[in-house]
Structures are given as C-alpha cells and as structure tokens.
Image (tube, rainbow, N blue to C red):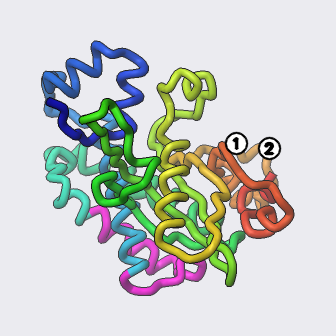
Amino acid sequence: MGHDTQSSVSQFETYAGCSYKHFLTYRLGVKERGEYVIRMPDIGILFHRCLELYMKKCFMRQIDIHEVSVSLRNQLIEESIQEALDIDHLTIFTSSHRNRYLIVKLTRILKRAIWGIEEQLKRSKFKPKEAEYSFNGREYPLDSLTLKVSDQHKAYLSGVVDRVDEYETEDALYFSIVDYKSGSKDLDYNLVKEGIQLQLIIYMNVIEEIKAHKVKKKVIPCGMYYYKIQDPMLNISDIDTKDIEKERLKSLNCEVYFSMMSKFFVTLMKPWSNLH
C-alpha cells in the first residue's frame, strides 16, 4: 500500500551522494552523539535566525531597508541576536566568558554582513519581500513541488528560502533568491549534474511557480545568489584610504550563479556588477 511522504531538497541531495547515508539519517534517524561545544552549524543557525528576525522587524515596522540609519540597524541587530538565542535555546553561547565573547564577535560579523546587504540593495530597485520563506507541496498543488514515486505514492517537496527580493512593474514581477552561507560553500556545477547540489536551482523554480500562482502578471526570475556571512579582512597597504569601504563591499559580494543579463536587468541589479 503506497503512502505520500514529505521530503526536502537536502534529502534528495543526500540520497544522490550516498543512499546508505540517506537510509541511516532519514529512515533510522541515526545521529552523531552530541557534545556540549559550539560547532559551525550552531553559528549558522544563529546567523540565519538573526537575519530572519532583522528582516521581519524591518517588514513589521515598515522600515525602508534602503534608508535605515546606522543606529537603528545596530539596535535591531542586537535585539535580533538576543531573541535568536532564546528562540533556538542556544544557551551554550552564554555558558562561559569565552562563549560570551564569541557573541560579541558574531555580532560584529552580523553588523558588517547586514551593512553589506543594505549597501548592495541601495544600488538596486529590488527590495526584500520574504525572509525565511517556507513552502510545502501539500499546500501548493504545483508540479515542481510534487514528485510521483508510483501510482499510489507521491513525495511532496518542502523547504525554506532565506530571502526573496522583488521588483514589480505594471506588467511583470521580477524576483531573485538569496541563500545565506556561514561557510565557504560554492556552487559546483559538477555536483549539480550529479544531483548533489540542487537546492538553489530547485528553490528558484519553486518560487517562480508559487509567484505565478499568486499574481496575475508575468513572473520573471532574475538571479540566484549565495551571500557569505563574514567580516572580511583587507590588506590596506594596497588600498587607498578613501576606497576602503568600496573594497570591503566588494569582498562581501554575493556569488552570482544565474542572472538575466538583459539591459533592463543590468539596470535593476547593479549592486554587484558595478563594484568590480
């Protein structure tokens, strides 16, 4: 007897990489024994939650992210960090003086990363529309979210997109997606071919279908990006003092993996192309 299941893109990627690992992880629920130490995934969870809370605070207060002041930005970031620690029960970050100092360091990194996001958006007509946007194939009867496994069995796709930016005209809705990364991960096209790195591409297709389902105008995907959360170090001996901020912004550029490089799109999405 067949039955419907719900799966994430990560599950498909895991299966493509190693079916045995998929079986152990998602069928048997085998997990590595936990240790009371801060790992990169913990930092990644904190970063993602803070960015989500920050964006949603801007949405709720109707703050134009193109015009937010430095003092207000810093205030919202510090509020978001404290809320994130409570929401995700990340008590380990306050368990010692060393870990409390790490929060200070991570706060600095977040402030720099969000400054970079806002400076890039100032050079664009796009604005953030969704933060941590979740979708579920059971809610949307769309082809890209439903996989037929057998005559009696369907698999519904679910996932979360870190950020969706939009620009709307009378006859079209343009959008791009951004995935935040706290590590050094890049998109490897060979892994894409092997089905091991599909997340960004599938998310792009899913968001296009969902938007087309909701609006009565043409929906045009414009770009998909990785944004690395970091506080880059610069070698200022080779940089003119007046160009330090420009060089810092360059180092915070999104990694671009798809873009419609039409004249219209270049006009809209200038933040990364005009910094080189």
Q: Position of residue 232 (x, y in %)?
A: 58, 46
How many residues crowd around disc 2 within 10 Å: few (fewer than 14), some, or many (20 or more)? few
Number of numbered discs: 2
Report the disc number at residue 113: none
Do callouts 1 and 2 mark residues in contact (Cβ within 8 Å)?
A: yes
Identity, as a three-letter code, of the amino acid under mark 1? Asn
Residue identifier under label 2: 238
Say which residue appears at 17% left-offset and 44% top-offset: 92
For the residue pair 63 and 225, the one nearer the viewer reads as 225
Q: Position of residue 164 (x, y in %)?
A: 51, 62
In the rendered image of this protein, does residue 11 appear above or below residue 16? below
For the residue pair 213 and 93, the one nearer the viewer reads as 213
Looking at the rendering, which quadrant does residue 53 occupy? Answer: bottom left
Question: Which region of the structure is painted magenta?
Answer: 60-81
Left or right side of 170 for 181:
left
Looking at the rendering, which quadrant does residue 118 occupy? Answer: bottom right
Q: Position of residue 38 (x, y in %)?
A: 25, 36
- On whether residue 69 falls in the magenta region, the answer is yes
Q: Secondary structure at mark 1?
A: loop
